[in-house]
Image (cartoon, grey):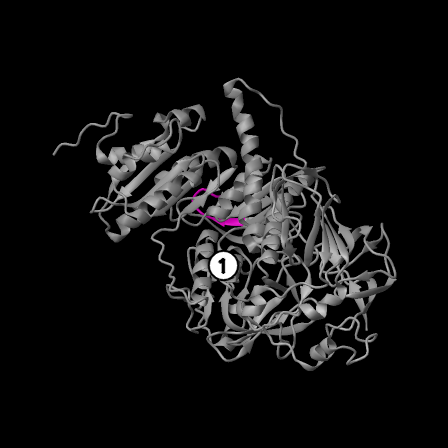
Amino acid sequence: MAQEIKVPDIGDFDEVEIIEVLVAEGDTVEKEQPLITLESDKATLEVPSTAAGKITSLKVSEGDKVSEGDVIATVEAEDESGDDDGDEEPAGDTAEADKQSDEPRGADEPSGEADDSGSGETVEVKVPDIGDFDSVEVIEVLVAEGDSVEKEQALITLESDKATLEVPSTAAGTISELKVKEGSTVSEGDLIALVASSGGSKQTQSESKSGGNKPASGDSAKASSGSGSKSEPKATTSASDDHNYDCDVLVLGSGPGGYTAAFRAADMGLNVTLVERHSVLGGVCLNVGCIPSKALLHSAKVIEDAANMASHGVTFGKPEIDLAKLLDYKQSVIDQLTGGLKSMASKRKVNVVNGTGTFADDHTLKIDGNDDVSQLTFNKAIIAVGSEPVMLPGWPEDERIWTSEDALSPDEIPGSLLVVGGGIIGCEIANVYAAHGTEVDIVEMTDSLIPGADKDLIKPLTKRMNKRCGNIWVSTKVTGLEAGDKLTASFEGKDAPESKDYDRVLVAVGRKPNGKKIGAENAGLEVNDRGFIPVDKQCRTNVDHIFAIGDVSGEPQLAHRATHQGKVAAECCAGEKSAFDAKVIPSVVYTDPEVAWTGVTETQAKKEGIEYTKGAFPWAANGRAIGLDATDGNTKLLFGKDGRIIGAGAVGSGAGDLIAETCLAIEMGADAHDIGLTIHPHPTLAETVGMAAEAEAGTLTDLYIPKKKK
């Protein structure tokens, strides 16, 4: 039967160029074998055949521009019964043939005999696309000549100055010859090994455990492995249930919590399907949140550090901003991480399905993809659908009014920007744009930037932000916004003007969970008025076999919380007695200076009547901070009645890294002596943690602190 091979989802691009055609008319191809290579201005993509057979017609050539859905080639598909020579070999020709035709194969029995029709073919395994590198080093050879390998099994590990890459076998069979060794330098297209193909891949362990590759009941979903290849979702028979489901665990959403849950479940032997509405894994954090914002904040810090070096006797000229290159750098950071996720999903045999998922019932997910609507059944599910930016009601619809996601991919650097909301996201993006030449104003309803953080930590940040921004109006709100040649904002507050014009307005007033967007009612799931799905310590919802993690499960809405919840949920799905019982979840503001805190804050302690004592150390007395010209920093530790640490905070360069030590101290129940007697390297900013503990213990010698009168 003839099958048309089409251009898959190419993201935000209208069209991309074909830079290589890998086959010719008349060629015989395997399912998943690459046919062409596409290239955008950001990455390359190989398009695989969706069927094994013969190329009867090629519709494209090198240099052509194609769009999503365009036909690439027509393949006359082979008989999918597993007997490639069935039409040429009379039935009953041999006893073995009779045995093959008369005896049905069990669900757990590998289909090696049927695949042997292709044995004897030698497959060349070559170095794939290695990006911008001319050559990379082979740091590990994972197989030897004579070894049997499966399709997608890693053969060698390559290393560049940025990352490592495992190169998999493109066929199942025996390594007949190795062409490289550890320490070799190779380039794209170089021959790695020769594989004597067995004609088909062996059944994976996950398929065997889950009852084989039985067809799913109902509509089948279009699935893709982490490598981008299309395959049907694997069916499974759960050990705890007599039903046949398409998967043991279905994970809805592939952000830090979702992909962690999927990978952990797969590592524990479960058959996992990961459903993601976007074309790449990683969710908000990797694609339009944590990671890209930190890439741009790095650029901002370099600009400001260079300007501040004049007082050190080193003067630089005014920076020239090439926005296209800056955004390309940001995208390269994203691509490296999302590409890593794609590879790890493939290696773990996690089925990745692209589409928007909503529950049809408590064991079925409806998936609205690009081309059709399908369904997947599951034994257990983990909801990791995250959150979205809150937009203010009554404001005009105008592309100049940004969410945080818009602000990370601007079409130009605006001359002026109003940031509505002085929380973490608002301050970080204000920091980015102020450093790149935009006049930035911030308006915050409460009486301080970063509401919820202790004011002594925020004071150095506010002082620095006042220098880099035009205005910071606290205890102020925006009462209206009109769209004309400019965006005109009206204000109500002590020091704010009645109105002011801006080129862009960023709304950074928080995020709302996506709990009401997934058909939760069809599965009997409880969702509160704000859109959160309540969970217990095992991240279990009111429906026993459905879990929820990350932003949708409650506050704080932080990626590192979601990651740990993802592991807990996956382990519970596998029958473990895991629980999310973290004592503390740290928060970090990645501005310059950074602000970080964990555990009980002074504000919280005073409000709740928690007894505490405090040890603090100013960075003005720290040699490393003085050398870095970062003397406005401070580190403090809070201790409870029993002398154990209950909270910590820091402001200054790298405070987000420094706070990690205090998280461990709280989890371990350390007291001031435990921390103070731990030898910290000198000179470092981390010393300030030890010295803050010494200040509490009364053993500090780096400052003179008069003894308290008894």
State which quarter of the image contains the N terminus.
bottom right
- The spot of residue 631 in percent (x, y) is 40, 28
Residue 412 showing in the rendered view: yes
Residue 493 counted in the magenta span: yes
* Residue 562 appears left or right of 348: left
Outermost residue, front direction? 95
Instruction: List x then y, in percent, for residue 59.
Output: 86, 60
Left or right, 470 with reference to 160: left
604 and 81: which is toward the camera: 81
Amino acid identity at mark 1? Arg
Looking at this view, is 487 or 353 the one in front? Answer: 353
Q: Which residues are magenta?
A: 490-496
Residue at the location (79% across, 70% down)?
A: 78
Q: For residue 53, which quarter of the picture?
A: bottom right
Mark 1: give few (<14), some (14-19) or many (20+) Cα within 10 Å: many
> Quadrant of the rendered structure where residue 620 is?
top left
Q: Single out the residue that lies furthest toward the top.
A: 313
Image quadrant in which you'd find residue 572: bottom left
Q: Position of residue 413 (x, y in %)?
A: 64, 41
Dot 1: what SS? helix
In x, y percent, where is residue 406? 61, 50
Residue 440 is inside the magenta segment: no
Towards the viewer: 541 or 26: 26
Q: Label 1, on which residue?
A: 264
213 vs 41, left or right, is left
Q: Is residue 422 visible?
A: no
Residue found 46% across the figure and 52% down from its top: 560
From the viewer's side, name the closer residue of 122 and 597.
Answer: 122
